[in-house]
Amino acid sequence: MTNAMMDRANEVIAKTYKRFPVVITRGSGCTLWDDAGKRYTDFVAGIAVCNLGHAHPKIAEALSAQAHTLWHVSNLFYSVPQMELAAWLTAHSFADRVFFCNSGAEANEAAIKLARKYFKEAGQGQRFRIISMEQSFHGRTMATLSATGQDKIKHGFDPLLEGFDFAPFDDPAALRAKIGPATAAVMLEPVQGEGGVRCPRPDYLKQVRALCDEAGLLLIFDEIQTGMGRTGKLFAYEHAGVKPDIMTLAKALANGLPMGAMLAREQVAAAFGPGSHASTFGGTPIVSAAALEVCRTMERDGILEHTRQISEYFRSKLEWLKGRHAVIEEVRGVGLLLGMRLATEGEPFVLQCMEQGFLINCVQGNILRFVPPLVISRAEIDALTGCLDGIFSATLEAESKRDQHA
Ligand SMILES: *Cc1c(COP(=O)(O)O)cnc(C)c1O
């Protein structure tokens, strides 16, 4: 059954993903099951999407209630869930207004469009360029790909959209040197996710904010991966004590339903008027109802506090592993966006973990990334780090045996 199913999928689905040979059929909390009934503890969470775990009963309830009431209306009309969600997000962030869409890339598209429109409206249409960071990831649409600082995923799509410059991440002096008379905005991830779980130095974002203020630029934070509690604060910018002008969200916003959002402060958001931008599905009642329950659950269940505590614990366990295995070069990250840089390829470890019932992920070739649901427990972390300890020990033994024979 499994092999036939996968063979059929490989015949009829676009070949854009390299998949593991596993058919996932069910999830609950931090656990997933495949079609053979094997269970996995999930440290991927749909890549930082299912922050409250799989099939969360409260969200399922909210979704079910809304499913029996109203799924979709055009944005030509008002709907209560969308209003309530926007009110929650603005009450809990720097922002005054929210534009809803369906994905991270779309949220970044909206941010890029708003930045350009803002300067056009201000009579400074010559300012349209956006500086983003090397190793950044902002999405796969033409504009967001153009904004992404990784050549390997841009290959083959020339010509890309004009107007993007790149600066090295975590280097304020290099950023300053890139700012010119045509620069409109700086766009960055407070912690680079796909780029390898890279945290900047503590004062970096403050310095970026100061550079933007000095040159009159908009500051855009892509919090698609870092937002909604992933780092132990609702939004990662809170750690740095600086506010952006525009912020984008997606991934965990509706815990697995497709939703993106672009948030901005009033003066900037004012550049978008009726007809400036739109989305058929953006902020539809059914997805908004799910996202609203995500927000309420985060508050009700003290998810941020749990994330901060469990992060300390997880980190200490990863540091313990690092002390035991020379192959681990660095433990990094914040909250439950954690990474472990290896001196070797990470993929074989991902596969061995999967065999033993743990899903983890590898980025940039040698960085193991851990982004479990925020509701992960100590026992689940102990089980994973125990598994990794065994795998690293076995690998080392095998290598030293091979060296002896050589
Ligand atoms: C995942 C991600 C995106 C793209 O989101 P999609 O929903 O896949 O379009 C953009 N930026 C960051 C930081 C991301 O992690």
Image (cartoon, helix red, strand yellow):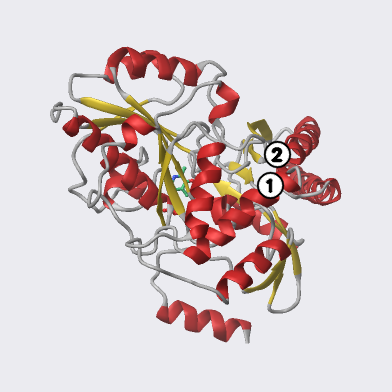
Task: Tell me what residue is drawn at x 35 percent, y 66 percent.
Answer: 74
Give the answer, above or below, for where 317 lies relative to 84. Answer: above
Residue 298 has which mark? Answer: 1
- The disc labelled 1 sits on which kind of residue? Met
Task: Tell me what residue is drawn at x 57 percent, y 55 percent.
Answer: 291
- Of helix, strand and loop, which one carries label 2? helix
Give the answer, above or below, for where 2 lies relative to 126. Answer: below
Residue 343: percent from left, percent from top: 61, 36
Query: Left or right of 47: which side holds 53?
Result: right
Task: Tell me what residue is drawn at x 54 percent, y 32 percent.
Answer: 198
Task: Tell me what residue is drawn at x 79 percent, y 30 percent.
Answer: 323
Foreground residue, 147 or 228? 228
Quarter of the figure with the N terminus: bottom right
- The disc labelled 2 sits on which kind of residue? Leu
- Of helix, strand and loop, which one carries label 1? helix
Residue 173: percent from left, percent from top: 37, 13
Tag 2 or tag 1, which sits nearer the N-term? 1
Foreground residue, 260 or 172? 260
Q: Is mark 2 within 8 Å of ligand 1?
A: no
Give the answer, above or below, for where 244 lies relative to 207. Answer: below
Name the quadrant containing residue 318. top right
Residue 304 has which mark? Answer: 2
Foreground residue, 315 or 59? 59
Residue 133 in view in this figure: no
